[in-house]
Amino acid sequence: MLRSKILRLLSPAINRRCMSSVPKIPLTLVEVDDKSGIATLSMNRPPVNLLDIDMMNSIIESITEIECNKSHGLILTSSNDRVFCAGLDLNELQKPNPERLKEFWAILQDLWLALHLCSVPTAAAINGQAPAGGCLLATACEYRVMMPELIIGINAVRFSYVVPRWFMLSYMSVLPRLVAERALTQGKLFTTAEALQVGLIDEVASSKEEAISKCSSFIGTFSKVNPIARSLTKKQFRESDVQKLLADRVGDIKESVEYISGPLLQEGLAAYLKELKSKSSSKPRKS
Amino acid sequence: MLRSKILRLLSPAINRRCMSSVPKIPLTLVEVDDKSGIATLSMNRPPVNLLDIDMMNSIIESITEIECNKSHGLILTSSNDRVFCAGLDLNELQKPNPERLKEFWAILQDLWLALHLCSVPTAAAINGQAPAGGCLLATACEYRVMMPELIIGINAVRFSYVVPRWFMLSYMSVLPRLVAERALTQGKLFTTAEALQVGLIDEVASSKEEAISKCSSFIGTFSKVNPIARSLTKKQFRESDVQKLLADRVGDIKESVEYISGPLLQEGLAAYLKELKSKSSSKPRKS
Amino acid sequence: MLRSKILRLLSPAINRRCMSSVPKIPLTLVEVDDKSGIATLSMNRPPVNLLDIDMMNSIIESITEIECNKSHGLILTSSNDRVFCAGLDLNELQKPNPERLKEFWAILQDLWLALHLCSVPTAAAINGQAPAGGCLLATACEYRVMMPELIIGINAVRFSYVVPRWFMLSYMSVLPRLVAERALTQGKLFTTAEALQVGLIDEVASSKEEAISKCSSFIGTFSKVNPIARSLTKKQFRESDVQKLLADRVGDIKESVEYISGPLLQEGLAAYLKELKSKSSSKPRKS
């Protein structure tokens, strides 16, 4: 039913911020549906869409491209039906080089800002697991549709990561305060059914196609609204949260680099990665 | 059942702020119920209680009068059973004179402050349509009862109006954050049933009399509370929202006048008014 | 089933802040369950656990002790099955000595901070009435289990007390904003069933033992989380509320002392205490 053309299959030759090598496969795919004018942004970094510097840059560029190409909306999804996005690339956090970590963190801030303030309507078609940073991306969107029997949540505390205030604000923009605090301190991963019940997602869909269709319907609710007035209203609404990050980006980077480099996170991370490894070797189908 | 006397049938001869001509009919009516001591403030500007400078001044004066005459509460309603309040008089916004618009906006701020900080318990008996500014007035009250098959909501984005932060705060004081953001960006008008479901209204009543009676019951829940301590508690609770406006009233006026005078709003407004006109000429019964 | 040892049955010989006489009975009891490592902090000031300077100091010291003795969590309860905590000792507020009132208020701030920022998971097993300050203590915890047919709520306005902003923040950290404002201005006391319905409590338990067991289960949900990372996450989440008090503790004390010493509160308090007295003499079983 969707007649779509591939607008952009190659990730940018020149990376905005760093001199990394050009990846062999595109990290993100952008397709615009001819009929609806809605763009689908597929995360496409095997195996689990980990967010490293290149991947985050690619997502930011795709968002910018979609904003510029007069798309009517943005649907964030994964080209991998098992994992939506497994979150930050923890290798970036383990025994980090401080300069690279600063850059990593600045780009994570950029990504958060780009998605939160995206000028077109945004929706997440969550077609795979969405822990940690995967959940963050989803909550930065305006609507969430998820396939059954998956998990979503900011479980950072499980690997001793104390998330910054702006991560918490994303969670609190969707969940009631009490639910957000409890889930953050527990590092809770919600099943699809639980996520629907607390409002972390808006709808359940039985297939990726259905998820995208439901996201398109949501974006369609804005069809009678002037897109510039809509975008300004969204920005006005989100401004007080966004200002909390913008007010001190450098301070946030400094604090984050210090915390990540410290023993609490490094030890927690090592134990967590070890546990993940032993799990994946014993039960290879479960991430 | 209500034995009431008309306290004030004439709008003030001297208007506080402007030299407008004295209207022929009173713009607002205040009646105090002898038994309950509760005042009903009826908006009475035909045909749809549009908020222009005179009307807003009249509402503010009626609020002040009710605060001063030892009433036990204030019920805001309309003397017109079809429309509670159709919102700002869009003629004030169309091709505006900057000086008059500044005055208009300052009085709108005054009205918001007067209703938000009203020292007696406030409730809205929503007996007619309540779009845009009509919804704003209702959400500034402490309780809302609405008649069936009406609409309520801040639909400003539909005519390209980006509401200021303090409009949003009124909405967020009643609705969950996610619902408020979505409704504001969609310009959603909730039906009575939808409004009840999301908590935008508290109760449904089948007649204006029943709506007023339910509002009176709500106001009665404060009967055992010292009215001064109650009023201070309400002000303390609302202070952080109110401060967001008070901190920069002049800046808000400046920003609003600029935005309203700009092409985005002027074009959106012209299209919206044209659409309303064509609707009302084809289906004269539907506002 | 619980094998517990009494860690501390005597209240501290030297009171941190004041030269009050050493009480004959311990004001608080701390027991640590051998198996779970969870500490129970029982308020033990007959007849109704009123919060005076000594009692608040004793609770703060018990919290500190539990934080230091490597307990896995803190369950706040009462050794009296009729009253969890009846709130501030109103004798401290009536015709107050300004210097003593300053000290009283500073310790109340300390108690609020100690409980809000407690480094271990906290839960309240509400085994008796919890009006006013009793409700405040419960809402400062992370979880609440309550026995049936009790009452809980911040009813301060009933004795003309206008609670400071930080009391309101505790309420708003648990209740939706609209519910919190309405309940504060009404001075509403929720029954157990009502409290469950609005989310003021999380669960109902038919006995104190069951309440403590449910609190233990909640605390158990953190068993896989690094306790330091958990504690930092909790503090980060609560920081913006806590800062609102910390930003001007002295100003809050000054304002509170002035308000409490003024005629509005003094008259309201006198009338309230008279009413309580007449109630307790006519119906001795009802508090």
Image (cartoon, coloured by chain):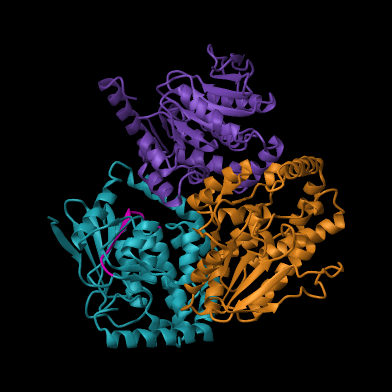
Chain colours: A cyan, B purple, C orange
Q: Is residue A285 left or right of residue A64?
A: left
Q: In which quarter of the image is residue A1?
A: bottom left
Tell me, yes or no, if residue B160 can be seen here.
no
Residue in view at x 61 percent, y 81 percent: C70
- In this view of the protein, which residue sits in the foreground, C17 or B87? C17
Query: How many numbered discs, if any?
Result: 0
- In this view of the protein, which residue sits in the foreground, B132 or B124? B124
Residue in view at x 51 percent, y 50 percent: C193
Q: Quadrant of residue C170?
A: bottom right
- In this view of the protein, which residue sits in the foreground, A56 or B218? B218
Horizontal and vertical percent for residue A58?
Answer: 31, 71
Q: Is residue C255 left or right of residue B3?
A: right
Q: Is residue A258 left or right of residue B232?
A: left
Decide: is C23 above or below C7.
Answer: above
Horizontal and vertical percent for residue A138?
Answer: 35, 63
Q: In this view, does A96 lie to the left or right of B141?
A: left
Instruction: Please tell me whether residue C176 belongs to the stretch shown in magenta.
Output: no
Q: Residue furthest top?
A: B24
In which quadrant will I find the N terminus of chain B? top right
In which quadrant will I find the C terminus of chain B? top left
Q: In which quarter of the image is residue C28?
A: bottom right
- In this view of the protein, which residue sits in the foreground, B250 or B233? B233
Horizontal and vertical percent for residue C139?
Answer: 59, 58
Decide: is C128 above or below B272.
Answer: below
Tell me, yes or no, if residue C165 can be seen here.
yes
Horizontal and vertical percent for residue C124?
Answer: 58, 63
Residue in view at x 55 percent, y 43 percent: B252
Which region shows up in magenta?
A117-128
Decide: is C270 above or below A262.
Answer: above
